[in-house]
Amino acid sequence: KIELCGRTAYKSEEKITPSSAEKFVKSIISRGHESVIEHVNITVKFITDRGVSHELVRHRLVSYTQESTRYVNYSKHGMTVIEPLIAEGSFEYILWLNRMRQVEQDYNELIKSGAKPEEARCILPNCLKTEIVTTANLREWRHILKLRTSKEAHPQIRELMLGLLREFKEKLPIIFDDVHENCYIQTKG
C-alpha cells in the first residue's frame, strides 16, 4: 500500500514487483518523503497511568479513546494504580502506598455517601491505571517515538514507548529501524 501510494507521486506504478516495496519504502524514508507513510494507521491499546496518558494525548494527529473516570465506578471495579519508579520498601514508596490506600478508601466513602463517579473522581491520583486506545499514522508514530524514547522523556512514558518501538521495529523494520537505531545511539551518547 505504501509503495503504491508513493509511486503515484512519481507515476512509476509500473515498477511495482512482488519484491520492490522494501527498497522503495526505505528509499523514500531516507529522503524524508514521509508523507507517503501517512496512508497507513496503526492502533495500539496502552495500559498506563493517567499521568503518562496526559503526556500521550499532547500528540494532536492521533485519535484517542480513554477509560472514563466520569463513568467508571471504581468502588465496583476496584481502583488499580500503576506503581511509580520508586524503590519498593523505601520510605517514599511506603508513603505513596499508604496514600493510595487512603485515596481508595475515601473514594469508596464518597460513592457510598451518594456521590456520582464523576464527582468522586476529583480525588483520584495521577497514577490511577487507565486504558487508552491510540490510532496514528506511521509518520506520526515515528514522531511520537522519536520524542518519547529520548533520554529527556519522562521515565515512565519512555519505558512504555521503548516497548512499543521494539515491537514496531520487529513487525515493520523498514519503517522503524532508523528510529530504533537513533534512540539507542542517543541513549548511549
Image (spheres, rainbow, N blue to C red):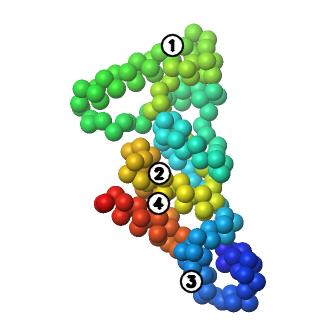
Closer to the eye: label 1 or 4: 4
Image coords of residue 17 (percent x, y): 66, 89
Which mark is first along the chain, 4 or 3? 3
Of the pair 76 and 65, the residue shown nearer to us: 65
Q: CA distance from mark 1 to mark 3?
A: 61 Å
* Residue 157 appears in the rendering: yes
* Residue 172 appears in the rendering: no
Q: Are marks 1 and 2 in contact (CB under 8 Å)?
A: no
Q: Kindly identify which numbered label has been placed on residue 23.
A: 3
Q: Kindly identify which numbered label has been placed on residue 109.
A: 1
Q: CA distance from mark 2 to mark 4?
A: 10 Å
Badge 4 crowding class, 10 Å Cα cut-off, few under 14, some 14 to 19, many 20 or more, is many
Judge from the rendering whether residue 140 lies leftward or rightward of residue 169; answer left or right: right
Which mark is first along the chain, 3 or 1? 3
Which mark is first along the chain, 4 or 1? 1
The answer to whether 72 is drawn above or below residue 160 in the figure is: above
Q: CA distance from mark 3 to mark 4?
A: 21 Å
Query: Going 50% across and 64% down the picture, which residue do you hit?
Result: 168
Secondary structure beneath label 3: helix
Image coords of residue 144 (percent x, y): 53, 54
Q: What number of labels is visible?
A: 4
Give the labeled residue for mark 4: 165
Give the labeled residue for mark 2: 148
Query: Going 61% across and 22% down the picture, which residue do you hit?
Result: 117
The answer to whether 155 is drawn above or below residue 169 in the figure is: above
Secondary structure beneath label 1: helix
Which mark is first along the chain, 3 or 2? 3
Please state which amino acid type lies under the numbered disc 3. Answer: Lys
Q: CA distance from mark 1 to mark 2?
A: 38 Å
Which mark is first along the chain, 4 or 2? 2
Q: CA distance from mark 1 to mark 4?
A: 41 Å
Please state which amino acid type lies under the numbered disc 1. Answer: Glu
